[in-house]
Image (cartoon, rainbow, N blue to C red):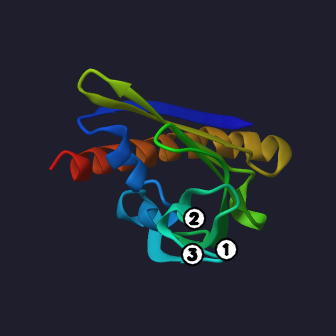
Amino acid sequence: MGSIERSIEIKAPPERIWEMLALDRLPEWEEGLKEKVEYISEIHDPKDKYRVGASTRTHIKGAGTIDFEITESLENERITYRMLGKRANKTVKTYILEPSEGGTKFTHLMTYEMPGGMLGKSLDRLGKGMLEKENEKSLEKLKGILEK
């Protein structure tokens, strides 16, 4: 199982960052996501976008369509998504928001599993560097949006 962890300081309160963590807001700053995100769970009010069980069908560059589902949600503190489908590689993403002196410490944790046994492990070495760069770009983009 592979994992990536990265934290960044953002000069914004947790509440502002939380708004950007709804599944339909991820394409605004997450590298690799295409524009089309559609909810497949019922959304009756904006808070429903953050509840456990909320899910979307999301189009990802190079991977096609993957469903996301929220598995943990603590408003303005922590949210976890799991990716579903054949190409999801058991990926789980967690975003943690911790108030800090200058705003918020924002941490992104991702775990994933490459298929293919030993071949998968070799591919993981190559893919991890790419995922880390993509993650870095995503966090910098989010920071840029929130600190304008």
Q: Is the N terminus in the top left, top right, bottom left or bottom right quadrant?
A: top right
Residues at discs 2 and 1 in contact (Cβ within 8 Å): yes
Against 57, residue 120 (above or below) is above
Foreground: 79 or 128? 79
Foreground: 38 or 136? 38
Mark 2 or 1: the one toward you: 2
Residue drawn at the location 44% of the way across and 45% of the way down: 135
Q: Which residue is mark 1?
A: 41
Q: Residues within 10 Å of mark 2 (few under 14, many from 20)?
A: some
Report the amino acid beneath label 1. Answer: Ser
SS under mark 2? helix
Report the amino acid beneath label 2. Answer: Asp
State the separation of the CA atoms marked 2 and 1. 9 Å
Residue drawn at the location 19% of the way across and 45% of the way down: 147
Q: Check the image and name the residue furthest to the left.
A: 148
Total labels drawn? 3
Against 30, residue 55 (above or below) is below
Residue drawn at the location 74% of the way across and 45% of the way down: 113
Instruction: Judge from the rendering whether residue 130 lies leftward or rightward of residue 94; answer left or right.
Output: left
Q: Which residue is mark 2?
A: 48
Q: Residues within 10 Å of mark 3 (few under 14, many from 20)?
A: few
